[in-house]
Image (cartoon, rainbow, N blue to C red):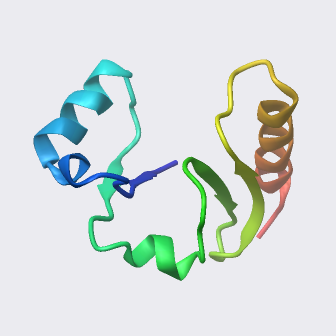
């Protein structure tokens, strides 16, 4: 899992702010900064937040738009997609 932080506001482009937020929210995965919106544009994204589940060949296999919280149907759907990808061979 990786996070890609694309800032909505100019102050969100500051590395220190992002690092403090990662620490505050106890994120254990790498978080990349997308200050020039390269990933945002490549994915044709239009939403904060957006979640993309990508398989080992780099194909997007699932998405979720908007906030996602543990125990919700959206979170369960993402988990099922991840489990099915982990079960794939090759």
Image quadrant in which you'd find residue 6: bottom left
Name which quarter of the figure residue 23 lies in. Answer: top left
Looking at the image, residue 2 sits to the left or right of residue 50; the answer is left
90 above or below 74? below
Q: Position of residue 36 (x, y in %)?
A: 28, 73
From the image, which quarter does the C terminus lie in?
A: bottom right
Percent position of residue 49, x then y: 56, 47
72 above or below 53?
above
- Residue 6 is left or right of residue 12, and the answer is right
On the image, the x and y values in percent for residue 46 come to 60, 65
Q: Residue at x 19, y 47 (%)?
A: 11
Q: Is residue 21 left or right of residue 89?
A: left
Residue at 81% across / 23% down in the picture? 72
Give the farthest residue toward the front.
9
Residue depicted at 15% across the width and 48% down the height? 15
The total of numbered circles placed on residues is 0
- Residue 88 lies, with reference to residue 78, above or below; the image says below
- Residue at 38% in and 22% down: 25
Q: Is residue 12 above or below residue 22?
A: below
- Residue 86 in percent (x, y) is at 76, 50
């Amino acid at each position: 899992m990786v996070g890609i932080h694309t800032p909505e506001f100019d102050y969100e482009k500051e590395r220190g702010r992002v690092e403090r937020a990662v620490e505050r929210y106890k994120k254990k995965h790498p978080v990349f900064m997308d200050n020039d919106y390269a990933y945002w544009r490549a994915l044709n994204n239009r939403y904060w937040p957006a979640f993309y589940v990508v398989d080992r060949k780099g194909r997007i296999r699932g998405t979720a738009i908007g906030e996602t919280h543990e125990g919700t149907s959206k979170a369960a759907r993402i988990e099922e997609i991840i489990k099915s990808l982990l079960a794939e061979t090759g």
